[in-house]
Amino acid sequence: MKTPETPRSTSATRTNVTMSDVARLAGVSPMSVSNFYNQPAKVSIDTRSKILEAATALGYVPNLLTGVYTSGRSRVVGAVVPSLHNPSCASMIQGLEDFLGQNGYRLMLAIAENQASEYRAVRVFLGHRLDGIILTGTDHSHDVFQLLTRTGVPVVETWSSSGPFIKMGVGFSLFEAAFEMAQIMINRGYQQIGFVGHHSYNNLHLSKFQNGFQIAMREAGLREDLVYFTTGTLGFATAKFALDHLLQREPKLQALFCASDLLAAGAIFECARRGWSVPDRLAVASYGDYDIAAEIKPGLTTIRASGHDIGAAAARMIVESLEVGLPLIKTIDVGYEIIVRDSI
Amino acid sequence: MKTPETPRSTSATRTNVTMSDVARLAGVSPMSVSNFYNQPAKVSIDTRSKILEAATALGYVPNLLTGVYTSGRSRVVGAVVPSLHNPSCASMIQGLEDFLGQNGYRLMLAIAENQASEYRAVRVFLGHRLDGIILTGTDHSHDVFQLLTRTGVPVVETWSSSGPFIKMGVGFSLFEAAFEMAQIMINRGYQQIGFVGHHSYNNLHLSKFQNGFQIAMREAGLREDLVYFTTGTLGFATAKFALDHLLQREPKLQALFCASDLLAAGAIFECARRGWSVPDRLAVASYGDYDIAAEIKPGLTTIRASGHDIGAAAARMIVESLEVGLPLIKTIDVGYEIIVRDSI
DNA sequence: CTGAAAGCGCTTACAG
DNA sequence: CTGAAAGCGCTTACAG
């Protein structure tokens, strides 16, 4: 006489119907149940209906995790982003999830505001044997670089189209975009132009943008040191401090180039508070082309780059390099566009 | 003589260092390596240093997936949200990720714009044997309901504090919030008040909000049928259509109650275009208290509820019910606040 | 403190 | 078309 099975305490509250349970009820071998889910063509119609009936009766949901061992694939891709409040990041995640979902993959998300937490997230991702890892920006700690270089997992860095990349990269030329926008402002006759950035752990990323601005200013023989970095949240309020600071250093400040529409909108709101006309008293340009850029008065002249496209491209690079073995394409430039409205 | 091991083709590009590899190099049993990672106190200092050295040399990252079998826990929680462009959703995810990350859990994210894709996401989550599932709103298909009821996995529905819930819920009283805001508007003397909602698959969710508005109007003996639902993206532009439509039905329209600040901001921008003063020609109130609410001119009177708190509370409910076995608390009301500014 | 045995739920590779 | 055997990388429960 057999002793009755004692349920494992941890699964007391879980149903945990297994393939064997289904097989037993259907009166077939577990192998047939496995085949039913993975290669139905190999299973006779008769067996198929028996299995389907048993699976439905038991409410069986196949365990996707076990496939990871045998196939070596988890079909999960991990992404690390600095924040979801940044519309660019939100769009990228949306693009990622869209492509991944349509191709049978899932997204594991980590939010990391500094390099230490980025490293922790990457370790956990590797521990979960994810099929691919997507990072924000190109500025990562040496530990992250080393961890990802050693492993065979595909890695895509986003937003910049110029490396060096750990493995693959997708984005646009931050330098060129900022350079071109600065030139447009200079051509319109603005001379005292301030630059407002936002401190995050992706400084290298932002520094390419800042460089574009400064080189353009230098080439035009203009002052290139009116640069201010905010540290608070990337909300509108932060812009006020930046404006105050720059005006103190250069009372004749004529224009502002902001690294984000959120900052630029804040500057425009602050001008409204001061009764200043934009662009007559202060011209404002920025990066983002978020919803608000077209709605605000005056419309914001800004750089548009598609976060959705970047996310989707990053996901495609991962999936393709998984399917083919090694990446075919190592870098994708999704380009940018300058949207001219009335703020400069 | 043994035949040399043939590497599995799928892992050709992966390092895949295993616990056994580390054990072999360190000259100890795999069990000691396992203990080293999970219960270091049980391992002698001598053994510990040998293992650490071997693990570092091989670049070993413990496989977190296998623990799922034996412990029955994946330490991953899944969340389904309709969109990341909605700041409320973004905040909730941020709150979720914060709490989860601090407690050693990870987030798997799915974006689902309709009930069918929500169902697919839930199936995949269950397949991955996630430790908990967080849903947006309380309006789900029967299939989702059934799937989640049968399983032992903890489930939290968000944003509403009134059920019926599949298992647990966290949010605030949508009805009360809308009712109170409508009363405030009525008390200020507005009579022709329009309501602007946004169609999504969480209609039940929104309908509680709409009900609050309509009951308040009915009790005051005012017209309650000036309701319009937009279908486009939740951007600013959508508000224009809503306003046009409601004005056509009621030219004397005095006020607008929007289900989102994004809609309200769009309405205010549209008023600016028409040269209408807010609140004199048209008063505007809404829900959200996003950044823009405080920045826009005039400041937006709006309902504030913390998405971050809701996310964190949902994560806590999952983790606690996992730790304790069964949920202690089934419902949490995080409350709301009405922020009065100048738009009404 | 250490490690040999059995098993988590599946899949691969194969014999029937 | 079907299924018995071995194994994926780890952990539990236990004997030493």
Image (spheres, coloured by chain):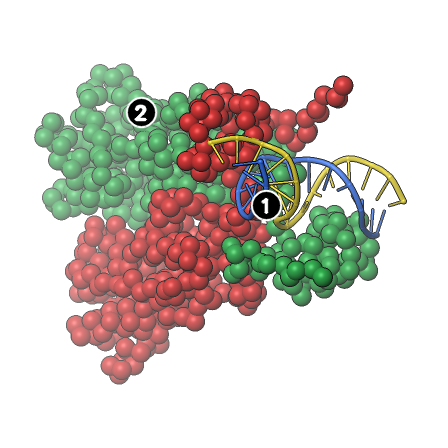
Chain colours: A green, B red, C yellow, D blue
Select label 1 or label 2 by which is in front: 1
Q: Which mark is residue B110?
A: none
Cα gap from disc 1 to disc 2, whole angstroms: 41 Å
Three-letter residue code for mark 2: Ser
Q: Give the quadrant of the N terminus of chain A.
A: bottom right
Q: Give the quadrant of the C terminus of chain A.
A: top left
Three-letter residue code for mark 1: Leu
Asked if residue A122 lies left or right of residue B273, the reply is right
Q: Residue at 41% of width from left, 25% of height from top?
A: A143
Q: Position of residue A333 (x, y in %)?
A: 47, 28
Q: Secondary structure at mark 1?
A: loop
Asked if residue A258 lies left or right of residue B90, the reply is left
Q: Earlier in the sequence, mark 1 or mark 2?
A: 1
Q: Residue at 35% of width from left, 74% of height from top?
A: B211
Depicted B203 relative to depicted A201: above or below: below
**Residue A337 occupies quadrant:** top left
